[in-house]
Image: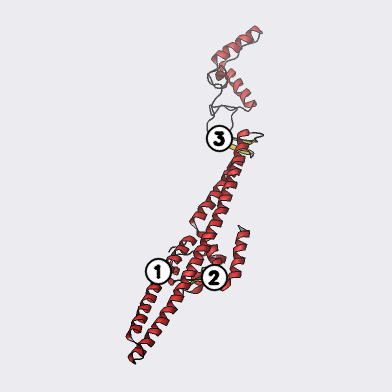
Amino acid sequence: MRAFSSFITALALLLGASTALLLPSGAQAQSVDPEWEPDGQNPAAISGSADPLVLTLDEAVRTALRKNLDLRAAQLDVEKANARVQEAWGDLYPSLDLSGSYTRNVVTANPFAGSDATSLLGGGGQTEWLAFNERRRLNDRSSITFREFQQRQQDSLAAAGISLGSGGNPFGVDNEFRGGLQLTQTLYSKQAFASVKGSQQFKDVSRYARDRQVQMVTNEVMTSFYQALLAQERVRVLRERVERAEETLQEVSTRVERGVIPKAQRLGASVELSNARTQRIEARNTADLARDQLKRTIGLSP
């Protein structure tokens, strides 16, 4: 793309001012974004809103390479192909997953609910009191009262740092934080590598199609430019022909009035003037059509 643009720039320098094409002032009424013009400048803004737009071959090609709809579509295909390549490589890149959680325990669940430990940690304890006194009797020791048995249980729990005031899990915590980090790397995947290869080939095809479209657009712009330039020059030639025919008719009319030449020559001069004017009108229409075709090729509104 850069080499081709350099070639077009060099060609425009060789052709010089002879390749400048005048577009009518109506061409400035179209909306032309500065970003689509060479060097970020709008030729209409440079020349003024009331003057015709002077368009060189270099500017025409550069503008077409930015605004031509077919070339835009080809460039979008290349960008889509690049995205597919990146997507295919994404299946082979390492994956790092980070997870975390936070739990605030207002009331913790008692893990001993429904078991025999319930009576020890929060139950009445009558059965345990009887069993305790029975073991003391077998060891020839005196029994204790139920209140004393409960007091001993509370003293033991307090010494262990266990509080039963909340009625929940004595070993629970109020705030719980959890975090995890997982790294995954694909070592080999036949399908993934095949997808990368296929997407790369599709990218190459899209790029070649884009380059071909650049060449086609450039060729169309150059052809339309020179056709419009030729039509414009033909209008100039026919305008001069009409002026000469008008001068000839005036001169012949003067000589006829003086009786130097017959009236038939004045009639012939009048016919020649009418033919020249008709050809000038046709040339103007052809020039307008050629300019409209050039603007369509460039990507501007006719």
Name above or below for residue 247 compared with residue 86. Answer: below
Three-letter code for the amino acid on which mark 2 is drawn: Thr
Q: Position of residue 68 (x, y in %)?
A: 50, 58
Question: Which residue in the protein does label 1 denote?
Answer: 285
Q: Are marks 3 and 1 in contact (CB under 8 Å)?
A: no
Q: Quadrant of residue 192?
A: top right
Give the secondary structure at mark 1.
helix
Q: Tag 2, which secondary structure?
A: helix
Q: Quarter holding the N terminus?
A: bottom right
Q: Which residue is located at x 50 percent, y 54 percent?
A: 70
Name the image quarter holding the C terminus. bottom left
Tag 3 or tag 2, which sits nearer the N-term? Answer: 2
**Which disc number belongs to residue 103?**
3
Residue drawn at x 60%, y 43% as measured from the top left? 201
Q: CA distance from mark 1 to mark 2?
A: 21 Å
Q: Position of residue 169 (x, y in %)?
A: 56, 26
Q: Residue at x 35, y 78 (%)?
A: 271
Q: CA distance from mark 2 to mark 3?
A: 77 Å
* Front of the two marks 3 and 1: 1
Q: Name the amino acid, label 3.
A: Thr
Pick the front one: 165 or 6: 6
* Residue designated by label 2: 19
Res 50 visible: no
The CA span between labels 3 and 1 is 82 Å
